[in-house]
Image (cartoon, helix red, strand yellow):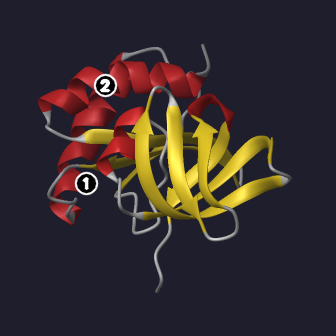
Amino acid sequence: MSEIQEIEKLLKPVAEQEKIEVVDVQYVKENGDWIARIFIDNEHGITMSDCERVSHVFSNVLDKSDVLKESYILEISSPGLNRVLKKEESFKRFIGSKVKIQTLKSINNQRNFLGELLDFSDGKVKINDATNGIVDINFLDIKKANIETDI
């Protein structure tokens, strides 16, 4: 299990207690420092005070565990307007939204899709792609997906 998966597993019950969702976890080395970046959300959106509160809670949990061996900087943030879609629940939640999806392999000679998210069922994402119309994409074939905003 990777460090990211271990962090997600460790924080999931804590996040549920705090009534938030861990949207994404990044654990990267930047300028010599290890950074644990955790993106959180809930149905009402995330405020700065939510980030502060969750930072203290997650920090205590992470510090008591042995998941992160190195000294690290913890960053808690909202996922922003172009939030990443990684979980099946996220795809279901954002049906009707404009999304950008990159696949691991080509579908009809295409790997990048942009359009309205129509459905998620039976392990497949259905998108009304701007280029090819309605396309079904196997969830396991998605390399990267996010909400696309027109700002």
Residue on which the image places disc 2: 12
Return the residue nearer the eye: 103 or 25.
103
Left or right of 110? Residue 131 is left
Residue 72 at x, y = what percent?
52, 39
Return the residue nearer the eye: 123 or 3.
123
Q: Residues within 10 Å of mark 2 (few under 14, many from 20)?
A: some
Query: Marks 2/1: CA distance?
Result: 16 Å
> First in sequence: mark 2 or mark 1?
2
Does residue 5 sit above or below 44 in this rendering? above
Residue 67 at x, y = what percent?
49, 18
Q: What residue do we see at 35% from left, 53% from top? A: 95
Residue on which the image places disc 1: 51
Q: What residue do we see at 21% from left, 60% from top? A: 45
Q: Amino acid type of disc 1?
A: Cys
Q: Is mark 1 on a helix, strand or loop?
A: helix
Q: How crowded is mark 1: few (under 14 residues within 10 Å), some or many (20 or more)?
A: some
Residue 131 at x, y = what percent?
70, 69
Q: Amino acid type of disc 2?
A: Lys
